[in-house]
Structures are given as C-alpha cells and as structure tokens.
Amino acid sequence: MWNLILQTFKNYFLFRGRADRKEFWTWALAMLAVSFVFICILGVIAFINSLLYRDSESPVLSGLFTAGITLFGLFWLVMFIPSLTVSVRRLRDAGITPWLLIIPIELGIFTFLVLCDQALYNMDPSTPARYSFAFACIMTAISAVTIIIFIILFCKPSQP
C-alpha cells in the first residue's frame, strides 16, 4: 500500500502513462483517511470550545481551530496536483478522455466562489440571503451526481 502512495508522489507531475485501479483507489482512500483525521480533530476542538465557553470562545482553542483549518487547506493545496495526475492516468487507463476532469474541477471552483460570495454578502446580518435554499439543493444534487458518475468511471477496468 505504501509503495503505491510513494509511486503517486514519484509521479507528482507525470500526466502521461497509466494508473491501475489499485493505485488510484489506494491514493483516494489515503487522502480520505487523512481528511477524516483532520475533520475529527477539528470537530473535537470545536466541540470542546462550545462546551467550555458557551457564550464566548477560548482564544487558544480558536487559534488551534484556525491553525487546523489552515493546515487542512495547505494539505489539500499540496495534494491537488498528485490527485489530479493519478486521476488523469486512471481515466486514461480506463480508456476515457481525461478532459472530463474539467467538469468536477469547474463545478468545485464555481461552488467555492458562490459560497465565498454568500459568506461575504451575509457578514451583515441585516441583509437577506442572496442565494435561495433551492439553489443550494440544486448545487448539492449536481455535485452528488457528478461524484457518482466519476466513481463509476474510475471503477472501469483497464483497457488494452
């Protein structure tokens, strides 16, 4: 297992070639496991903060939470390229054009920008929501369908 993860790191910028299902899913599960650990630690910090400081927040726990979020963001920033390269190689191995990866990348960027815009717009509590609940549901449904389609594509067997 560690050999496959190291192999993905060795091919950090290599978009050519192929990646079999085992290499791709080992990488995906490793990234999922690290993300799960980050989220659990951040959740525990937020939970402890809410238990100990009901009306305010602890500067130490708040700083830990901010540092954890920052580390998590940096982790995914560093892991984006190897994740992209192993995905491109996996799609190529399955006989599918890697250009299809533009769809979830653009969808993720669009969703991120909408969420940032909404957060900045709602900093003043007197302003109404810019986007409706229905819009959020539609974006969630589109993201879920996209994820399911790509999971199916990544599970296809290798092509000769």
Image (cartoon, helix red, strand yellow):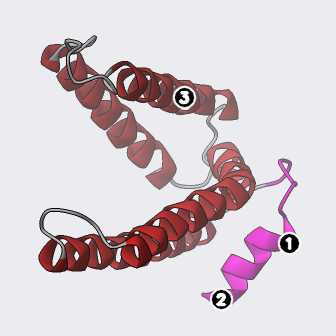
- How many tags in the picture? 3
Per the rendered image, the range of residues in magenta is 1-17
Q: Amino acid at mark 1?
A: Lys
Calculate the distance from the C-alpha at mark 2 to the C-alpha at mark 3. 31 Å
Q: In the rendered image, which residue does mark 3 sit on? A: 109
Q: Amino acid at mark 2?
A: Trp
Image coords of residue 153 (percent x, y): 47, 43
Above or below residue 141? Residue 61 is below
Secondary structure beneath label 3: helix
Say few, some or many: other residues with alpha carbon within 10 Å of mark 2 (under 14 / 14 to 19 / 20 or more): few
Image coords of residue 27 (percent x, y): 58, 69
Secondary structure beneath label 1: helix
Say few, some or many: other residues with alpha carbon within 10 Å of mark 1 (under 14 / 14 to 19 / 20 or more): few
Is residue 4 one of those drawn in magenta?
A: yes
- Side (left or right) of 104 relative to 123: right
> Can you tell which of label 2 and label 3 is closer to the viewer?
3
Above or below residue 24? Residue 144 is above
Q: Which mark is residue 10?
A: 1
The residue at the point 45 percent across, 28 percent down is 116
- Side (left or right) of 61 relative to 81: left
Q: In the rendered image, which residue does mark 2 sit on? A: 2
Is residue 121 one of those drawn in magenta?
A: no
Image coords of residue 63 (percent x, y): 48, 70
Q: Earlier in the sequence, mark 2 or mark 1?
A: 2
The residue at the point 75 percent across, 80 percent down is 6
Q: Quadrant of residue 91?
A: top right
Q: Amino acid at mark 3?
A: Ile
- Side (left or right) of 15 relative to 43: right
The residue at the point 74 percent across, 69 percent down is 8
Q: Earlier in the sequence, mark 2 or mark 3?
A: 2
> Can you tell which of label 3 and label 1 is closer to the viewer?
3
Q: Which mark is residue 159?
A: none
